[in-house]
Image (tube, grey):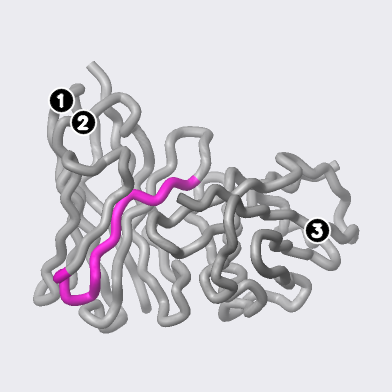
Amino acid sequence: EIVLTQSPGTLSLSPGEGTTLSCRASQSVISSYLAWYQQKPGQAPRLLIYGTSSRAAGIPDRFSGSGSGTDFTLTISRLEPEDFAVYYCQQYSTPLTFGGGTKVEIK
Amino acid sequence: EVQLVESGGGLVQPGGSLRLSCAASGFTFSAHWMHWVRQAPGKGLVWVSRIRNDGSSTSYADSVKGRFTISRDNAKNTLYLQMNSLRAEDTAVYYCVRVSWYNAFDIWGQGTMVTVSS
């Protein structure tokens, strides 16, 4: 099983700031199998990034993904009020696994 | 509108059973692999099970193997999760999820809550 470790656990930031979230895998992940999701309280997760770096439909270009092998990142260039949420990375090789999440909170 | 709507959650005693359903609409259900993902209160996302688009292949997380069964009825556009021998640690919101052609979860249901408690 591929274990995904996300860091940091929590980020306290202000609107307008940029940030980078990390997702580290215990073994190499196929780049096309790495995705990022956003989840707000009381809501289902929403797909942001698939295939490491491709934005899902309707996702603004302030969100970008990069990485390869065991190290992947999600970058938010300028935080909007609606971006404060929990972010999860996920890999698609069976058994599928998610990272533990990074909470981006308002400072 | 592309939509997944789960039902069947509720309160059940340890050792009991429950069957979750997920009604799909707005897309060709039979063309997509489907998954169940759960989330315990205040915790992260955990993959539970998946089924091939034609139902011919399934896979399970170790934590539910032998207790849960995923199935689908493509004629009814419905996904199921039969949960037996339920434990307190199965308490969670269960999400029905569609897999896109690019191997990511592009459509999520709203979730159904399962509580295992005496």
Q: Looking at the image, do the residues carrying marks 2 and 1 touch, with CB atoms under 8 Å apart? A: yes
Q: Quadrant of the N terminus of chain B?
A: bottom left
Q: Which residue is mark 2?
A: B86
> In this rendering, is residue B14 above or below B49?
above
Residue B49 lies within the magenta run: yes
User: Residue drawn at (72%, 71%), measured in percent from left and top?
Assistant: A66
Q: Are callouts 3 and 1 both on one chain?
A: no
Question: Which quadrant of the view contains residue B72?
Answer: bottom left
Q: Which residue is mark 3?
A: A20
User: Residue drawn at (78%, 72%), measured in percent from left and top?
Assistant: A62
The x and y percentages for residue A99 are: 57, 49
Secondary structure at badge 3 equals: strand
User: Residue drawn at (80%, 58%), measured in percent from left and top?
Assistant: A20
Q: Residues within 10 Å of mark 1 (few under 14, many from 20)?
A: some
Q: Quadrant of the C terminus of chain B?
A: top left
Question: Which quadrant of the view contains residue A77?
Answer: bottom right
**Of B62 and A54, which appears nearest the observer?**
B62
Which chain does tag 3 point to?
A
Which chain does tag 2 point to?
B
Q: Which residue is mark 1?
A: B15
Q: Residues within 10 Å of mark 3 (few under 14, many from 20)?
A: some
Chain part drawn in magenta: B45-56
| Relative side of B110 to A79, left or right | left
* Circle 3: residue type: Thr
Q: How many marks?
A: 3
Q: Are callouts 2 and 3 both on one chain?
A: no
